[in-house]
């Protein structure tokens, strides 16, 4: 009989399993702390468990573990990109972003992606499969092991894949990240980024999670956005904005709209005015970033003057906006640059 993937169980599910096997449910909390706080890679490392419990765990459960195939560290800002091999031989990329007061991990949620966004380096590789909760949790366990002196404070689901397309697994993973016996990372320190899957956003609003929601917008024009983010053809701006406004009203949380500025595509003064009109009276902010050049793409980065003019136009119209500096560009770890590769 196949063993149970222990890290893909929530604490309550694990408690039920232990009870089913004749063990006390409180052992789940103890084992969670070993798995996530101590980063134990085997049951033998769990030194305060009884011999009988060790035997049970080894007979019934399996602990997943990612293998580090390679890594690259930015000489500019210390950002490090990791290539991990999954147990089935597939690979994913995960990024560690150290800063003075915090450390962020950019997580992948799928092997590949279905949504073919024009500016994204993951798109040409297509979709392979969803990541299990254990694999997403292992991204953080692995980076904690690789960077023991840098506590993890923030998590962003902005790596390879569309998080809301792997909805159930991502939500379960977030709850384990938040669990006090696991990582104890506050929900407000966890961001989920979506290309605009309206059904996923509608489900998310009922979860009562205080997480941050980020929506990849990139244009206030349906034609331009459909060219950049093809899912817009299924969920056009009218439907997406109605869904976002409802999410804000229901959760009383703001939404961050991500906007990649691409020269001669979406960063003119008129583009900024359209965006301001689209977001008028919405509890939100705009997070702009300049396009990162990707091989085989003809898109270009805007000038510093174009970026300033775009931001000034938004702010003059009353839209909260900022420009984010991309990190890890010299190792292809910047926004939109992740891909399944050999680094």
Image: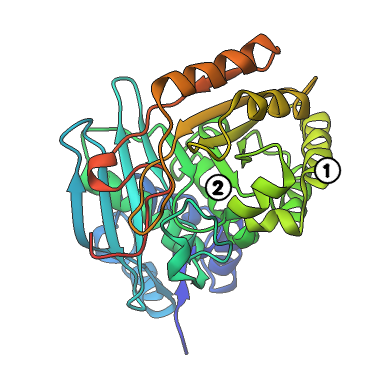
Q: Residue at x 76, y 59 (%)?
A: 234
Q: Left of 199 or right of it: where is 44?
A: left
Distance from disc 1 to disc 2, alpha carbons, whole Å, reads 29 Å
Q: Left of 236 or right of it: where is 154?
A: left
Q: Residue at x 28, y 39 (%)?
A: 328
Task: Please tell me whether residue 3 is drawn above or below residue 258 in the rendered image.
Answer: below
Residue 138, horizontal then vertical, whole percent: 37, 57
Task: Please tell me whether residue 242 is drawn above or below residue 303 in the rendered image.
Answer: below
Residue 108, horizontal then vertical, whole percent: 44, 55
Residue, far bottom: 1
Residue, far front: 264
| Residue position for label 2 | 174
Q: Residue at x 39, y 68 (%)?
A: 53
Residue, far left: 75
Q: Quadrant of residue 35?
A: bottom left
The answer to which of marks 1 and 2 sits earlier in the sequence is: 2
Q: Left of 52 or right of it: where is 180?
A: right
For the residue labelled by badge 2, is the local secondary structure a helix, a strand or a loop? helix
**Of 14 and 306, which appears nearest the observer?**
306
Task: Determine crowd level at label 2: few under 14, some 14-19, many 20+ residues with C-alpha closer than 10 A.
Answer: many
**Of 10 and 203, which appears nearest the observer?**
203
Q: Residue at x 62, y 54 (%)?
A: 227
| Residue position for label 1 | 238
């Amino acid at each position: 009989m196949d063993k149970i993937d222990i890290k893909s169980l929530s604490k309550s599910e694990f408690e039920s399993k232990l009870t089913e096997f004749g063990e006390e449910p409180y052992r789940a909390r103890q084992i969670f702390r070993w798995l996530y706080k101590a980063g134990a890679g085997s049951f033998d490392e769990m030194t305060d468990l009884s011999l009988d419990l060790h035997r049970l765990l080894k007979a019934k459960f399996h602990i997943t573990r990612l293998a580090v195939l390679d890594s690259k560290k930015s000489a500019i800002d210390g950002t490090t990109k990791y290539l991990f091999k999954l147990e089935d031989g597939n690979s994913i990329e995960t990024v560690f972003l150290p800063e003075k007061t915090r450390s962020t991990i950019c997580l992948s949620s799928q092997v590949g992606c279905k949504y073919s966004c024009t500016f994204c380096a993951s798109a040409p590789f297509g979709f392979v499969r969803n990541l299990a909760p254990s694999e997403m949790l292992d991204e953080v366990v692995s980076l904690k092991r690789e960077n023991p002196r840098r506590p993890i404070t923030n998590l962003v689901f902005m790596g390879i894949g569309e998080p809301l397309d792997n909805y159930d697994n991502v939500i379960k993973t977030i709850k384990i990240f938040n669990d006090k016996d696991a990582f104890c990372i506050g929900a407000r320190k966890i961001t989920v980024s979506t290309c605009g899957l309206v059904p996923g956003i509608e489900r998310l609003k009922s979860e009562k999670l205080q997480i941050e929601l980020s929506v990849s917008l990139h244009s206030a024009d349906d034609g331009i956005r459909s060219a950049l983010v093809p899912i817009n053809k299924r969920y056009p701006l009218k439907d997406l904005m109605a869904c976002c406004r409802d999410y804000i009203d229901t959760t009383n949380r703001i939404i961050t709209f991500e906007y990649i500025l691409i020269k001669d595509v979406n960063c003119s003064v008129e583009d900024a005015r359209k965006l301001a009109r689209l977001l008028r009276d919405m509890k939100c902010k705009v997070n702009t970033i300049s396009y990162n050049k990707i091989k085989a793409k003809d898109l270009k980065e805007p000038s510093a003057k174009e970026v300033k003019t775009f931001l000034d136009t938004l702010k003059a119209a009353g839209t909260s906006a900022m420009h984010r500096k991309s990190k890890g560009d010299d190792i292809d770890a910047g926004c939109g640059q992740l891909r399944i590769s050999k680094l």
